[in-house]
Image: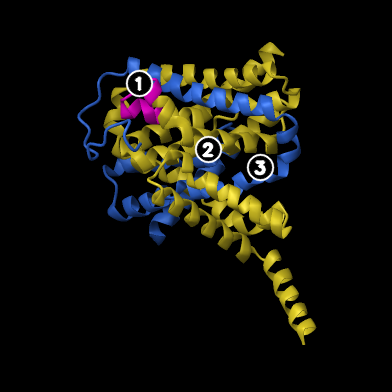
């Protein structure tokens, strides 16, 4: 776990350095993801400790957004002053965006290979 | 005697409300409470754990008079892990790479259509219902992960911290109602469902997709990264062309 955490931080650090040195508009962690991906391709597999630690971290990904989410408090004035346009725009565009992206992708993609992840079907408890 | 006790309690309170320990612990407790409610009530998407935790924390902070900055001094340790977690998305991406490669072309088209559909519809809807110019500009990049969204917002004259709030709210809306809208649109392909969540709702959409299915999670992570890239490159350019 400690080894994997070190690898993750190293990838992020190198990603930040590249983004800053080359003035790329891409955030360091996204470049870090590409670096780790490249590393896994070169190695030809995911070592078990990396699989476990990454899985553990990603299982609670939504926890990591809570501190920023509580920042809603700091903007209460504007949010309540323009509540109607903000609520309509956020709901409308988000649901429209999810549906349009997924629909276009589903129409264009070739049928998926058989599902090997446990046979859950969409529309149930998803 | 009671005065002494009160003074002592007040000292403890002053210490706790200013130390990182309180903010950090509160965040973890609020999240576990959110998860518990979510699990207990049949994993309904409406009872999104993030939403519950944010509401709980906002309530507690308001009642106790702790300001957001003091809270964040502790909670930033959790916030920091967003970076390494983004890097870790390479693992599901690698596991599903075979499928990703097969649908690359569909993905690029869906990315461009979905990314512009989200940004445009947000701006048009906010404008149509009387939103201010600052709100419109802060709204445009809200589908992508916070660091990119905040940078883009600054470039096009929005308020970065307001954009960060829109980003989170977008994610919570998608995590809560995404399943419903995807069923409504009759999309059954896990790749497409995940990709839609990632493109339109960044990391929170990805977190939701990962909860449901690994294939969906991998495509969501990729959609989040690709839309971050597309938005960072395209939105400022479009803005300069049209304004």
Disc 2 element: helix
What's the chain of the residue with tag 2? B
Mark 1: few/some/many CA within 10 Å (<14, 14-19, 20+) = some
Main SS, magenta residues? helix
Residue at image point 36% right, 18% down: B106
Chain part drawn in magenta: B183-195
The residue carrying pointer 3 sits among few (fewer than 14), some (14 to 19) or many (20 or more) residues within 10 Å by Cα, namely many
Question: Which label number is shown at residue A72?
Answer: 3
- Tint applied to chain B in the drawing: yellow
Pick the front one: B230 or B184: B184
Q: Which chain is blue?
A: A
**Residues at circles 3 and 2 in contact by the CB criterion of under 8 Å:** no
Residue with the mark numbered 1: B186
Magenta run includes residue B194: yes
In the picture of the structure, the residue carrying the numbered disc 2 is B172
Q: Secondary structure at mark 3?
A: helix
The residues tagged by marks 1 and 2 sit, at their Cα atoms, a distance apart of: 21 Å
Looking at the image, residue B116 sits to the left or right of residue B5; the answer is left
């Amino acid at each position: 776990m400690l080894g994997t955490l070190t690898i993750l931080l190293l990838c992020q650090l190198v990603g930040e350095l590249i983004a800053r040195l080359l003035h790329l508009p891409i955030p360091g962690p996204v470049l870090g993801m590409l670096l780790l991906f490249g590393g896994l391709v070169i190695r030809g597999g995911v070592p078990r400790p990396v699989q476990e630690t990454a899985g553990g971290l990603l299982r609670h990904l939504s926890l990591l957004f809570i501190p920023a989410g509580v920042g809603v408090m700091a903007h209460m004035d504007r949010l309540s002053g323009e509540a109607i346009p903000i609520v309509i725009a956020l709901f409308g565009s988000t649901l429209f965006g999810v549906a349009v992206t997924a629909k276009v992708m589903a129409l264009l993609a070739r049928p998926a290979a058989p599902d090997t992840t446990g046979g859950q079907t969409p529309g149930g408890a998803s | 005697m009671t005065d002494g006790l009160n003074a002592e309690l007040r000292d403890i309170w002053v210490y706790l409300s200013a130390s990182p320990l309180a903010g950090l612990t509160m965040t973890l407790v609020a999240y576990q409470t959110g998860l518990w409610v979510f699990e207990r009530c049949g994993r309904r998407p409406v009872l999104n754990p993030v939403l519950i935790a944010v509401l709980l924390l906002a309530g507690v902070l308001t009642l106790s008079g702790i300001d957001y900055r003091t809270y964040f001094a502790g909670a930033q340790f959790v916030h920091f892990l967003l970076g390494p977690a983004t890097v870790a998305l390479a693992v599901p991406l690698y596991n599903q790479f075979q499928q990703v490669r097969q649908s690359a072309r569909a993905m690029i088209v869906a990315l461009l259509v979905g990314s512009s559909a989200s940004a445009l519809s947000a701006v048009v809807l906010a404008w149509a219902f009387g939103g201010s110019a600052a709100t419109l500009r802060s709204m445009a990049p809200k589908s992508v992960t916070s660091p990119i969204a905040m940078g883009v917002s600054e470039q096009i004259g929005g308020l970065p911290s307001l954009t960060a709030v829109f980003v989170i709210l977008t994610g919570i809306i998608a995590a809560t109602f995404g399943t419903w809208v995807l069923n409504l649109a009759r999309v059954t392909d896990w790749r497409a469902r995940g990709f839609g969540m990632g493109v339109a709702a960044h990391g929170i959409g990805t977190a939701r997709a990962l909860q449901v299915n690994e294939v969906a999670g991998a495509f969501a992570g990729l959609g989040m990264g690709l839309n971050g890239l597309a938005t960072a490159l395209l939105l400022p350019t479009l803005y300069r062309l049209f304004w």
